Amino acid sequence: MDKENIKKIIKVLSETYPNAKCALEFQSPYELLVSTILSAQCTDVRVNQVTEELYKNYNTPEKMISLTEEELGEKIKSCGFYKNKSKNILGATRNIIQKYGGKVPKTMEELIELPGVGRKTANVVLSNAFGVPAIAVDTHVFRVSNRLGIAKGDTPEKVEKDLMENIPREMWSDTHHYLIWHGRQICKARKPQCEVCPVAPYCEYFNDEVKE
Ligand code: SF4
C-alpha cells in the first residue's frame, strides 16, 4: 500500500479514537511490566481488577520478591495461566533487582532478556512507561494491519517491521493504540463491521470483498 493511503488511514483512525491509550492502569514502569505479563490471554479489565488489590502492598520489585510463587499465584489466579505468570513475574523481578538495582531497564535488548518478556511486552513498556516510540504487535494490531494492508506478514515480527517502515517514527506509539481500539470496537476478529468502518474506503480487505 502506498504511504499516502497509510497516512489517510492513520488520520481517520486518530479522529475516530482521539482518546486511545494504554488500557492497563499503572503508576510506574514496574507496575506496567507486571500488568503486561498478566495481560497475556486475559482482558485488561480483569488485569486492572487484580492489580488494584495486588499493587496496594506489592508495587515495587523489593515488595514483590517477598512473595513465594504460590502466594503470588493465589493473588493473580483469575488472570489465568497463573503458575507460569507468577514464575515469570518473580523471575523478572529477581533479575531487575540483581542486574538493574531495582529499576526496570529501558532498552529492548535488556527487557527481552527478562523471564516472560517478549518483544510485545517490551514494546508496551518502552512506549507507555518510557515514551520511546514503539509498536507492540498484539493480536489486534496483527489482524487489523494485515486486513487494512498497512503491513503484511504471517508473524508479529514481520508486521512490526513493516509498520515501522511504513509509519513515521513519531506516530508509532499512537498508531499502536489506534489499531488496538479499532480491532476491539469495529475490526473484530470473527466479524469485522466493515459497513460502519470509517477506514473502509482505504482498506484492502474491504476493497477485495467488494470486488468479488
Ligand atoms: Fe476491518 Fe472491515 Fe474496517 Fe477493513 S473495512 S479495517 S476489514 S472493519
Image (cartoon, grey):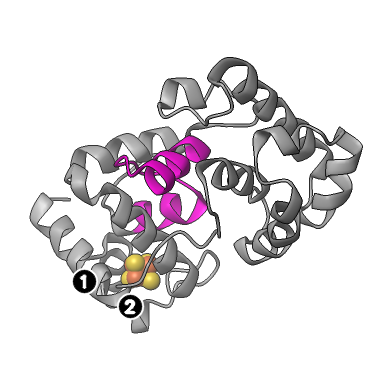
**Of residues 10 and 171, the one drawn nearer to the viewer in this rendering:** 171
Q: Are marks 1 and 2 in contact (CB under 8 Å)?
A: no
Q: Is residue 107 left or right of residue 98?
A: left
Structural crowding at the residue carrying mark 2, measured as other residues with C-alpha within 10 Å and reported as few (<14), some (14–19) or many (≥20): some
Q: Is mark 1 within 8 Å of ligand 1?
A: no
Structural crowding at the residue carrying mark 1, measured as other residues with C-alpha within 10 Å and reported as few (<14), some (14–19) or many (≥20): some
Q: Residue at x 52, y 25 (%)?
A: 112
Q: Is residue 63 left or right of residue 169?
A: right
Q: Is residue 196 left or right of residue 165?
A: right
The circle on residue 102 is none
Q: Quadrant of residue 11?
A: bottom left
**Placement of 133 over or under 103, stated as above or below:** below
Q: Residue at x 59, y 46 (%)?
A: 31
- Identify the amino acid type marked 1: Val
The circle on residue 12 is 1
Q: Is residue 115 magenta?
A: no
Label 1 or label 2, whichever lies nearer to me, is 1
The number of numbered discs placed on residues in the rendered structure image is 2
**Of residues 158 and 85, the one drawn nearer to the viewer in this rendering:** 85
**Placement of 143 over or under 68, stated as above or below:** below
Q: Which residues are magenta?
A: 120-147
Quadrant for ligand 1 reads: bottom left
Q: Is mark 2 within 8 Å of ligand 1?
A: yes
Q: Which residue is mark 2?
A: 197
- Dominant SS in magenta: helix
Q: Residue at x 30, y 59 (%)?
A: 148
